[in-house]
Image (spheres, rainbow, N blue to C red):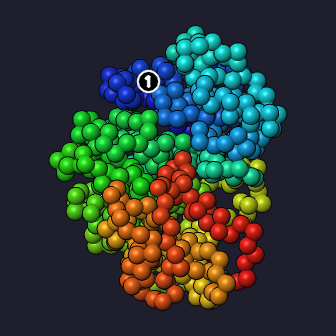
Amino acid sequence: MLELASLVSYHARYRPDAIAVVLDDARLTWREFAARVARCANALLDRGVRKGDRVVTVLGNCRELLDVYWAAPSIGAVLVPASPLLAAAGLASLLRDCEPRCLITDRAMLATIDAAQREQQWVPSGRLLVIDGADCEAGDYAAATANASDRLVPAPVSADDIFNIMYTSGTTGQPKGIVHTHFIRAMYALLMGSAWRMTPESVVLHSGAIVFNGAFVTLMPAFYHGGTYVLHRQFDAARTIATIERERVTHVMLVPSQIIAILESPALREEKLESLEMMLSLGAPLHDEYRARLSRLLPNRFYELYGLTEGFVTILDRSDAIRKAGSVGKPPVFYRMRIVREDGSDCEPGEVGEIIGRGPILMNGYFNRPDITADAIRDGWLYSGDLGYVDADGYLYLVDRKKDMIVSGGIKVYPKDIEEVVVRNPDVLEVAVFGVPDTKWGESPLAAVVLRDGAKITAEALRDWINERVGARYQRVSRVTILPAFPRSAAGKILKRELREPYWAGHVATI
């Protein structure tokens, strides 16, 4: 048996008065948090949820969402976090795929959920609504948990039982639900906690959405060690800085856009971040310009993680951040990585190929999708779809997404190489480069940029600036488009597909 969800009750027994969770003005001890989790779990049982049943949450960051994260697995149910940014069609496909027994949401999402139910005709046996002080026909979360017992006997679960299903963000068509077992999440707790040098005294801040998988790389080890988990409802750079200073935060995980916002914030002062032992970047490559600034601001505190929700990671440790600048690190202990050519043979150091890997957090597969599981995992190796190379020491350097690579006049062009040039312009805050149709070359690079406040540079002037500095003629951008903001996933990633689609709509590729 592997009662991973017993972590909360364990700390409630042995560290009952230590602070477990901080959100807004509320500070919950382990004893108080364990009681909330037990009441939530018993409320789910009262609604007919049993081992193996799926429990969908459609919630932003809140205490209730954290309750469910530990309550559902404690009774053997399967946690399915869904982003509140999903439209009705995307939510409908998710519900159709996982067939949940129960859905937990808030009143603001009811119109979207009702539209999703009509679209796929899903009728749950019980629906809980998060506290908003009003009676609800389908059942009210506050009333359900208030009347439930705060004593819980966890259900026996095995290492291979499903802990959660994580659906890829922005699901609108055929969904892809990534299955993580209790064993896999236990490995997140053990291996990530070691990598981040966490202890029971660690104070871990998370200010992004916890519905995406990246949140688990600090959430699981924080709860395993019994540290303090500080949660913001949403990201705000100034508030993040203030919280780090006030709570003496030791560990924080951020996506690149959040790191950039902190570096650009007028509230930033080095002394406000002095308690940090780790600032982790993940979700997308952090451009070298910002890496260098961060390393100057927080020497020996920067980590970077490259990884896939499907179950492979590399980690750039803080001790390697300067020595291996530009790298995303190496596989942790118990992981293996290869760089392979199209024919499956291994690349030499310095040679670009597809990154494949295996390790103890490798998914069991995509839920109900053996077809695409077989394509992603071959002979026990996860094929990432990402391109990279290793140096002579085995450290990984990302080149780009295989699907984002531009083929211009038969030459392979990697957007990341151009982005590293663009972001050096003092007027540019963020950039995304992608291929657009070109009658002569088949494809040519386009740079979409978000400018800094007050910047006056024109698109034409920026295009000329870029093309004077790129390393090769085929890297020159055909145009620059200036945007007020980028479309993003719930995880904060720039959605290049949404930027690219209007240019390719109705176009038949000739390459």
Counting the numbered discs, the total is 1
Between residue 52 and residue 55, name the one nearer to us. Answer: 55
Q: At 40% from the left edge and 75% from the top edge, which residue is drawn?
A: 461
Above or below for 448 versus 68: below
Query: Is disc 1 surrounded by few (<14), some (14 to 19) or many (20+) residues within 10 Å?
Result: many
- Secondary structure at numbered mark 1: helix
The quarter of the picture where the C terminus appears is bottom right
Q: Amino acid at mark 1?
A: Phe
Q: At 51% from the left edge and 67% from the top edge, which residue is drawn?
A: 481
Q: Which residue is mark 1?
A: 33
In the displayed structure, does residue 19 sit left or right of residue 369?
left
In the displayed structure, does residue 87 sit left or right of residue 148?
right
Question: Residue 26: x, y in percent?
Answer: 37, 23
The quarter of the picture where the N terminus appears is top right
Q: At 39% from the left edge and 29% from the top edge, which residue is drawn?
A: 23
Would you identify the image quadrant in which residue 103 lies? top right
Question: Residue 37: x, y in percent?
Answer: 51, 24
Between residue 88 and residue 499, name the one nearer to us. Answer: 499
User: Which residue is the extreme one toward the left?
Assistant: 271
Question: Residue 260: x, y in percent?
Answer: 35, 56
Above or below for 228 versus 269: above
Above or below for 204 versus 464: above
Between residue 322 and residue 467, name the one nearer to us. Answer: 467
Above or below for 13 versus 60: above
Q: Is residue 125 visible?
A: yes
Question: Residue 442: x, y in percent?
Answer: 66, 83
User: Which residue is the extreme one toward the right?
Assistant: 121
Q: At 23% from the left edge and 57% from the top edge, which residue is drawn?
A: 298
